[in-house]
Image: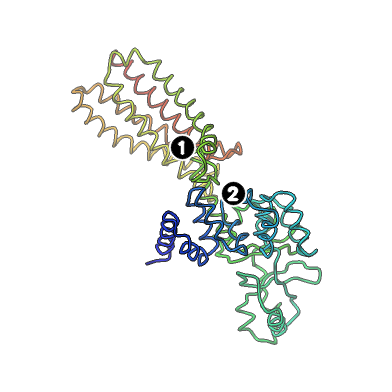
Amino acid sequence: MNVSTRKEARLVALREALDSGTLRPAQRMVAAMHPAEIALLLESVPPRQRELVWGMVDPELEGDVLVELNENVRQELIGEMATEELVAAAEGMELDDLADLVGDLPETVTLQVLRSMDQRDRERLRNVLSWPEDSAGGLMNTDTVSVRADVTLEVVLRYLRMRGELPARTDSLFVVDRDDHYLGTIALTRIITGDPEASVGESLDTEAPRIEPETAAHDVAQLFQDRDLVSAAVVGVEGRLLGRITIDDVVDVIRQEAEHSVLSMAGLQDEEDLFAGIVPSTRRRLLWLGINLVTAFLAAAVVKSFEGTIEKVAALAALMPIVASMGGIAGTQTVTLIIRGLALGQVQWDNARWLLFKEIAVGGLNGLLWALVVGVVTVFWFDTWQIAGIIAAAMLINLLAAAAVGVLVPLALRRLDIDPALSAGVIITTFTDCIGFATLLGLGALFLT
């Protein structure tokens, strides 16, 4: 049984224990779980059971669990916690995790947390909070280990032994000068295996990436992916070492971006609580449903303008969903590929012309193939080549239009600083429905009436 299966089985067993009311075994299972697993469990149960599980969490782990939760569930739990409990939960957390949590805490709690910290940690936390959450500065942890280039590896080893422990996920040390200007890194493996009398400067990696604090979180994730990094330095405009970003923070960014892409295409929030109440869930979905209703009226208006044609040739009404559906699927395929390419930095305006030609060619070939299939089926259904030719032509035109719109719409939205994942889907559906209906009914009006 793999790790994923074991975790799923454990969560199922725990939910069954909660359903049956046997709380003692459930409490033992919660005590043995990692904070991330507890957070997943809290997000996987209805509100009443959520209260029971939260009551079983060790107070020392509450802060770590809160950080792992999605925003809606976290705010719900924070709203039910006493001030003293929140302050206790924040104590001992890593600064980058605490920075993620502080934004959701009441102001009075935040002030108490700051007062409970020493001056050095307080300044470090304020430094992280001064940067946007979705930037390298917002991701960084200021808990770094730095050494000077002129000391020997033996001196560094003695310093590390005296220090006793290193921050989690430390694979290298940062090398700085007397004024804390970043020079590069030295790998821990080099410190351990190298000549003890050699200086740090002799093993200095000056090509190690340095990330500016203003860098977008997406670009940071891309850099870690391209360079297979475990950690990287965040360096200010004056060249001073500000902190470091580690792979665990980048994994969170990648997961959030993946969730954003999936949920945005359905008009849902990134932090949607699956078990939220009926009224809040209804309210969150109203706007997107309203937008889709407007687009549906546009398609209906196109159909209405050809109602005379439909009355005379009823067969066209039966064939309308085929044209619209095929165009919608083809457009969705194209727009999904383009949005993914935009997210990975593979698609820009300078290569859009080639992509546009390619997608139109693909749409044309698919259109010809499936137009032939639909035409043959239509002949058997209605025993007329005229209707078969009309629906075949309409399908071909709609697939060509879907390919063109699927490329151009995401690029145009990105140029307008609008998230393509949020808006492209509904625009594609509107275009393909309207073009498909207009083409099918227009050709029907031209050749059949």
**Whether residue 173 is situated above or below residue 248 in the rendered picture:** below
Amino acid residing under circle 2 = Glu
Dot label at residue 406: 1
Q: Position of residue 103 (x, y in %)?
A: 68, 50
Give the alpha-carbon distance from disc 2 to disc 1, as whole Å. Answer: 32 Å
- Pick the front one: 5 or 349: 5
Mark 2: which secondary structure?
A: helix
| Residue 421 appears in view | no
Q: Where is residue 449 in the image (x, y as percent from the top left)?
A: 29, 12
**Whether residue 371 is situated above or below residue 164 in the rendered picture:** above
Mark 1: which secondary structure?
A: helix
Q: Is residue 412 left or right of residue 233?
A: left
Query: Counting other residues with Cα less than 10 Å from the Cα at mark 2, is it few (<14), some (14-19), or many (20 or more)?
Result: some
In the image, what residue occupies the spot 67% across and 55% down? 138
Q: In this view, does 229 lie to the left or right of 95?
A: left
Query: Counting other residues with Cα less than 10 Å from the Cα at mark 1, is it few (<14), some (14-19), or many (20 or more)?
Result: many
The residue carrying mark 2 is 71
